[in-house]
């Protein structure tokens, strides 16, 4: 019988190393993400509030100061990482309105690497406003795609042609389930 954990939802049992069960993992925010999101939010909410004090004859400036920051805030919020799910041989990253699905079939290696993002340069994406997501590069990993909420609690997934970094809670369980589901089916 499947057991329930307080932060894990389960549907069916794993049979023969196949990941048919839904495992859900929280996406806890690290301190740096909390601080950067707070700072960015204060600025993007503060500018529209400040615009309300603009003279009434400055309608264009007021609209720009209201519209641009709020558009940025809403746009970035859409890419928030809400949780991670493992099911049917895939990693699903839950966003605000959709899931990004990564097929684990070609996975070559998975490891817990707490500071995998250290020394990274963002080449495209979000560097800490509701998430660290997009394309990054550092000496150790080379180019990689991040779906991270805590850069000090990373898991690195290596595929033949790409590297992905995530940061779910219960990392040991996450890695064990992926290894069991992906590598045992190849034996």
Image (spheres, rainbow, N blue to C red):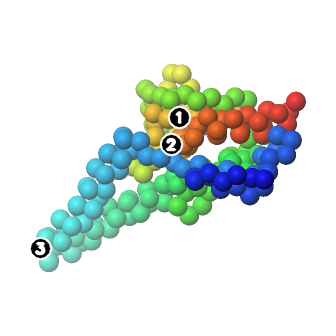
> For mark 2, what is the residue?
148
Q: Secondary structure at mark 2?
A: strand
Q: Quadrant of residue 99?
A: bottom right
Q: Are marks 1 and 2 in contact (CB under 8 Å)?
A: yes
> For mark 3, what is the residue?
55
**Residue at x-position 37% and y-position 60%:** 73
Expressed as whole percent of the image width and height from the top left, the position of residue 87 reads 73, 50
**Residue at x-position 21% and y-position 75%:** 59
- Residue toward you, 6 or 167: 6
- Whether residue 46 is visible to the viewer of this picture, yes or no, is yes
- Residue toward you, 119 or 179: 179
- Whether residue 126 is visible to the viewer of this picture, yes or no, is no
Q: Quadrant of residue 60?
A: bottom left
Mark 1 to mark 2: distance in Å? 7 Å
**Residue at x-position 13% and y-position 70%:** 53
On residue 154, which mark appears? Answer: 1
**Residue at x-position 41% and y-position 42%:** 30
Say whether disc 3 or disc 2 marks the residue closer to the N-terminus. 3
């Amino acid at each position: 019988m499947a057991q329930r954990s307080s932060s894990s939802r389960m549907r069916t049992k794993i049979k023969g190393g196949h990941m048919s069960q839904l495992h859900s993992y929280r996406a806890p925010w690290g301190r740096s993400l909390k601080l950067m999101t707070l700072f960015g939010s204060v600025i993007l909410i503060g500018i529209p509030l400040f615009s309300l004090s603009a003279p009434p004859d400055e309608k264009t400036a007021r609209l720009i100061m209201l519209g641009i920051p709020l558009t940025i805030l809403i746009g970035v919020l859409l890419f928030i990482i809400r949780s991670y799910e493992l099911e049917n041989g895939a990693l699903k990253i839950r966003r605000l309105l959709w899931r990004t699905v990564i097929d684990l079939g070609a996975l070559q290696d998975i490891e817990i690497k707490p500071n995998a993002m250290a020394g990274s340069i963002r080449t495209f994406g979000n560097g800490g406003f509701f998430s660290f997501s997009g394309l990054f590069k550092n000496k150790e990993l080379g180019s990689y795609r991040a779906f991270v909420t805590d850069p000090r609690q990373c898991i690195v997934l290596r595929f033949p042609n790409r590297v992905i970094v995530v940061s779910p809670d219960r990392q040991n369980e996450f890695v064990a389930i992926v290894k069991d589901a992906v590598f045992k089916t190849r034996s």
